[in-house]
Image: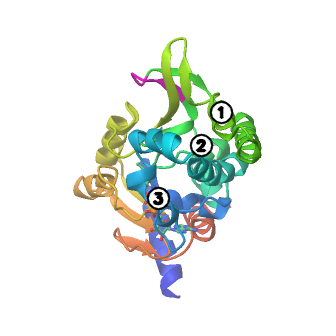
Amino acid sequence: MSGFSEQLETAGRWIRSAERIGVFTGAGISAESGIATFRDAGGFWQKYPPEEFATWDGILHLSATNPNLLADFLLELLEPIAEAEPNPGHRAIAALEQHRRVTVMTQNVDALHQDAGSREVKEIHGTFFEIVNSSGERLRTVTRAELLDVVESLRKAKESFFRRINLASAVRPMLGLGTHGFYRPNLVLFGDGMNEPDWTESLDVAQNCDVFLTVGTSGLVLPAAMLPHEAASSGAKCIAVDPSEESGDLWFPGTAGEVLPRLLEAAFPN
Ligand code: OAD
């Protein structure tokens, strides 16, 4: 039996014996849905440094000084998310729920776990699919179709003569000043607090699950990266799926779309 098959068998046994499973995901799980990761070669932050593009102050500054660049950034960020569909990795995690209690804790803001059918999803870095006011109160949800409309309007605005005005109105469904003050997508940017109650609930899951599965994260951003450590020190068996980031008790150096369906099959063969 090859090393990979042995590993699959061990991981399958751990998953089968678990009552509660925590699944912690990062950008890597959505890579096969066409959404770029942040730190891989050609990743998002190489082109758009987070100091400038991943804070509300930075975004406000750019809207005044370089709206075209801001529009490029928003288009590159939003378009793949608006067009994305779950991949076999998301679907395998959702299918795991048919067998065990599973809580997904994701750093992603693309809602692909929910689209794949996962029911218990903690969005620790927030989501593009919810609008909040300046105090963080939830005002409404956003559909993928609405996001696609914003992308279309942004593209038209970039080519128009009154660019600055049209860019502001393109993003107005999601970002602006309304009758109840400032509203924006419920995103956790650098310097913001974590999305609650999702973060506190995720810590609780990490401390109380039997198996903790980490998928597609560089583990460089705190406090999110604490979760696998919390799980390990609370006694969970830790499995990691990532082509290049080794971690956990058992590491599968492959992609989410390839490895997760095989892991599901190893745990619960048809
Ligand atoms: P990163 O871009 O830092 O890491 C992506 C990880 O996915 C890397 O370890 C890759 O090896 C792995 N990967 C790439 N393709 C994969 C595939 N097909 N299957 C599985 N894994 C794959 O993304 P995150 O760790 O999610 O935060 O980044 C964490 C946070 O940093 C984000 O939530 C975001 C960012 O700044 C904020 O914006 C607050």
Q: Secondary structure at mark 3?
A: helix
Residue on which the image places disc 1: 165
Decide which of tag 2 and tag 1 comes sooner along the chain.
2
Of badges 2 and 1, the one in the foreground is 1
Pick whichever, 244 or 206, lies toward us.
Answer: 244
Q: Which mark, by number, is residue 111?
A: 2
Q: Are marks 2 and 1 in contact (CB under 8 Å)?
A: no
Q: Is residue 85 visible?
A: no
Q: Secondary structure at mark 1?
A: helix
Residue on which the image places disc 3: 15
Q: CA distance from mark 3 to mark 2?
A: 24 Å
Judge whether 78 appears above or below 255 on screen.
above
Report whether 266 appears left or right of 82. Answer: left
Judge whether 42 appears above or below 79 on screen.
below
The residue type indicated by label 3 comes to Ile
Q: Which residues are magenta?
A: 131-136
Q: CA distance from mark 1 to mark 3?
A: 53 Å
Pick whichever, 106 or 73, lies toward us.
Answer: 73
- Residue 121: x percent and y percent? 51, 40
Judge whether 5 appears above or below 203 on screen.
below
Decide which of tag 1 and tag 3 comes sooner along the chain.
3
Q: Quadrant of the C terminus?
A: bottom right
Tell me what residue is drawn at x 27 percent, y 59 percent. Answer: 232
Pick whichever, 34 or 91, lies toward us.
Answer: 34
Of badges 1 and 3, the one in the foreground is 1
Tell me what residue is drawn at x 44 percent, y 20 percent. Answer: 137
Of badges 3 and 2, the one in the foreground is 2
